Image: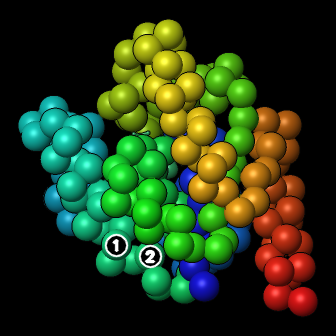
Amino acid sequence: MTLILIGFMGSGKSTVAGVLSENYVDLDLEIVRKIGMPIAQFFEKFGEAEFRVVEHQVFSELIDSGGVIATGGGIVESPENRELLALQSEVVYLKANFSSLWQRINADKKNVRPLAQNGAEIVEKLYEKRKKSYQGLADLTVEVADKSPEEIAQIIFDWQKGQKE
Ligand SMILES: Nc1ncnc2c1ncn2[C@@H]1O[C@H](COP(=O)(O)OP(=O)(O)O)[C@@H](O)[C@H]1O
Ligand SMILES: O=C(O)C1=C[C@@H](OP(=O)(O)O)[C@@H](O)[C@H](O)C1
Ligand SMILES: [Mg+2]
């Protein structure tokens, strides 16, 4: 069974995956490896639609790996990815209010998120649009705004243990 973390940019998917497993897969890092350039540069050169094609390809190759996968916030944009996620039973949604996410995104200077370069209003619209998809696909929802990555990982571990009993 693959544990898949979903949620908006800044929710901590990459960070929490690292706490959950030493061998986690970060989909964005796999994509960067495949395209041979930073995501922001790929968006500039080829656009978002092309990024989604590569994202789906990489996701469908890794979804049955059996480990922990941190997705990118836009994984729910493609209907094909939503179908894949609906078939999984360990999809964990890291949920937070927009202002917490926006603060984190802006503090995280080393990771340039092309879709977060627009103003807060535009990014909040994207958040509102995606929210239902994250919630609808989640087998577990964790409120992350006031918790440390370790606390969040512990909640997920405990839930997983309960699933297996
Ligand atoms: N639980 C948390 N509490 C405070 N800051 C966090 C938490 N989880 C992640 N962060 C910080 O928020 C930023 C985004 O985290 P990241 O794991 O890259 O999110 P995502 O992969 O969901 O976009 C990073 O700077 C990270 O250090
Ligand atoms: O929300 C999105 O569309 C994106 C989120 C990013 O991942 P994180 O959610 O890990 O920041 C990354 O995949 C890309 O910049 C697009
Ligand atoms: Mg990430």
Q: Is residue 53 left or right of residue 133?
A: left
Residue 141 seen anywhere in this rendered image of the structure: yes
Element class at badge 2: loop
Residue type at mark 2: give it. Ile
**Would you identify the image quadrant in which residue 81 lies?**
bottom left
Q: Which residue is mark 1?
A: 60
Q: Would you place residue 46 above or below residue 34 in this image?
A: above
Query: Residue farthest to the left?
Result: 45
The quadrant in which the N terminus is found is bottom right
Q: Would you place residue 148 above or below residue 25 in this image?
A: above
Q: Is residue 161 left or right of residue 46?
A: right
Q: CA distance from mark 1 to mark 2?
A: 5 Å
Q: Would you place residue 18 above or below residue 127 in this image?
A: below
* Badge 1 vs badge 2, beta-carbon distance below 8 Å: yes
Q: What residue is drawn where x is 59% and y is 47%?
A: 134
Badge 2 residue CB within 8 Å of ligand 2: no
Quadrant of the rendered image holding ligand 2:
top left
Where residue 36 appears, as percent x and y from the top left, is 17, 59
Find residue 63 and name its label: 2
Where residue 2 appears, as percent x and y from the top left, is 57, 79
Depth check: give the residue in front, 25 or 77: 77
Residue type at mark 1: give it. Ser
Q: Is residue 29 left or right of residue 127?
A: left
Where residue 128 appears, as percent x and y from the top left, is 56, 25
> Mark 1 packing: few (<14 Cα in 10 Å), some, or many (20+)?
some
Where residue 106 appears, as percent x and y from the top left, is 54, 24
Element class at badge 1: helix
Residue 28 seen anywhere in this rendered image of the structure: no
**Would you identify the image quadrant in which residue 122 lies?**
top left
> Mark 2 packing: few (<14 Cα in 10 Å), some, or many (20+)?
many
